[in-house]
Amino acid sequence: MLEVTDVVAGYGRGVVLQGVSLSVADGEILGVLGRNGMGKSTLIRVLAGLLRPRGGRLRVAGVDLTKAPAHVRSRHGIAVVPQGRGVFGDLSVTENLRLGRLAAGTRVTEDRHRQVLEYFPRLAERPRQRAGTMSGGEQQMLAIARALMAEPRILLLDEPSDGIMPVLVRQIADHLRAINRAEGLTTVVVEQNVPMVARMASRCLILEGGTIVAGGTPDELAASGEIERHLGV
Ligand SMILES: Nc1ncnc2c1ncn2[C@@H]1O[C@H](COP(=O)(O)OP(=O)(O)OP(=O)(O)O)[C@@H](O)[C@H]1O
């Protein structure tokens, strides 16, 4: 579904990603683990079309989208949940979701709204609550729900555990897993939270020094000591 080959990217003269290659199968949940500053957000920006890579290639379902900007990638079914969530604090849950629908154009229906709320009972309970008054975990759920309104084929998540208490992190991981199962949604999550990724991802890569240094199932990476070696946990 998603194929990234030898991507080089950075800012100004600095190079952050120094030849990253990865592929994600249709319906797979891939976790990319890395410590602070290892380039996880940079990778998400490149996948979402928000940062133009200096080299390498990106394909979605066989179509070369290397040069496609974010709005074109969105039409090809890529949705992103940014770090820090990016919900509209002054708007209600319903209004935030409607904006997700607007962004998707006309093909999304009221049925989708209902379906997305079924995945997140906490949001369904509070349609009129302003997003800014919700807890970090609820705002993260709203950010994910809003991205889902577009009925994406690929969901990109940038550190969804950031600033959220562990019980809600586990819930969010379980929701993402359930959505993945129900819709066959291909998911890429970049994280430093190992338990969250272990709970939801079928396969993991470790990003360090601008390249992928290890890969395997979460259990394999824990057993071989790679997680401890590269993430220090
Ligand atoms: N807009 C920018 N301009 C210049 N340098 C940047 C910019 N954004 C990120 N960087 C640098 O690129 C490197 C990788 O940053 P990135 O945000 O991708 O890391 P990360 O793994 O997501 O880190 P964190 O876990 O702290 O969010 C860092 O050294 C950072 O300072």
Image (cartoon, rainbow, N blue to C red):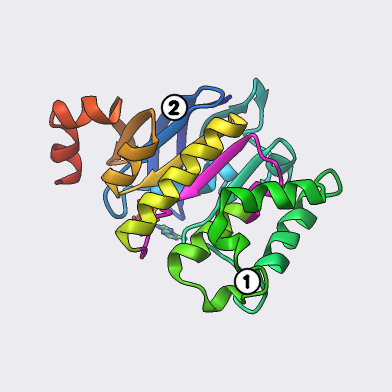
Residue to which mark 1 is pinned: 88
| Residue 11 shows in the view | yes
**Residue 3: image x %, image y %?**
53, 25
Relative to 153, residue 14 above or below: below
Which quadrant of the figure has residue 89? bottom right
What residue lies at 72% left-to-right and 68% top-to-bottom? Answer: 95
Residue at 62% from the left image edge and 77% from the top image edge: 130
Residue 109 horizontal side relative to residue 131, left or right: right
Q: Which mark is residue 22?
A: 2
Q: Which residues are magenta?
A: 146-164
Image position, residue 180 (x, y; %): 53, 34
SS at circle 2: strand
- Taking the magenta stretch, the answer to whether it contains residue 150 is yes
- First in sequence: mark 1 vs mark 2: 2
- Ligand 1 position by quadrant: bottom left
Q: Is residue 61 above or below residue 45?
A: above
Q: Which mark is residue 11?
A: none
Q: Amino acid at mark 1?
A: Phe
